[in-house]
Image (spheres, rainbow, N blue to C red):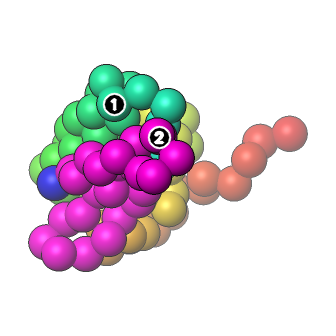
Amino acid sequence: MATIRKLSNGKYRADIRKNYTFIQAKTFLAKKTAEQWASDMDANIEAILNLTPSKIKNLTPEIVSEMGGLDLFQKLGIELGSVDVSPQP
C-alpha cells in the first residue's frame, strides 16, 4: 500500500508499506511520477509475494533486480537461497 504526500519543499514522497511494515520510500518532483513509481512497486511486491517456492528457486539475478532487488525480497521476508545476486564483473 502506498501513501503519497506533499512535502514542505514542494516535492512528493511515496511511502510503501505492506502489512504495516515500512518497505521503501522515494521522493519525486511530480506527484504523477510518485504515483507511477508507487503503483509499480505495489505490483512488484504482489508479484514477489505470489511466487511459489519453485519459482523463487529458479530466479536469476536479472529477474531479482527487475522485481525490485535483493533488498526488497529481504524486506518482504523472502529467502532467495541459492540465487547469486552479487554484481557480475
In the image, taking residue 4 as reference, residue 73 lies left or right, namely right
Dominant SS of magenta comes to strand
Q: Can you say whether 69 is above or below 79 in the image? A: above
Residue 17 x/y as whole percent:
24, 63
Q: Position of residue 57 (x, y in %)?
A: 36, 54
From the viewer's side, name the closer residue of 2 and 77.
2
Task: Give the mark nearer the N terminus: 2 vs 1.
Answer: 2
The answer to which image quadrant residue 49 occupies is bottom left
Residue that carries the numbered disc 2 in the rendered image = 11
Q: What stretch is highlighted in magenta?
A: 2-25
81 left or right of 18 in image: right
Find numbered disc 2 in the image and state the secondary structure of the residue it sits on.
loop
Instruction: Identify which amino acid the numbered label 2 is placed on.
Output: Lys
**Residue position marked by numbered label 1 in the rendering:** 31
Quadrant position of residue 25: bottom left
Residue 21 appears in view: yes
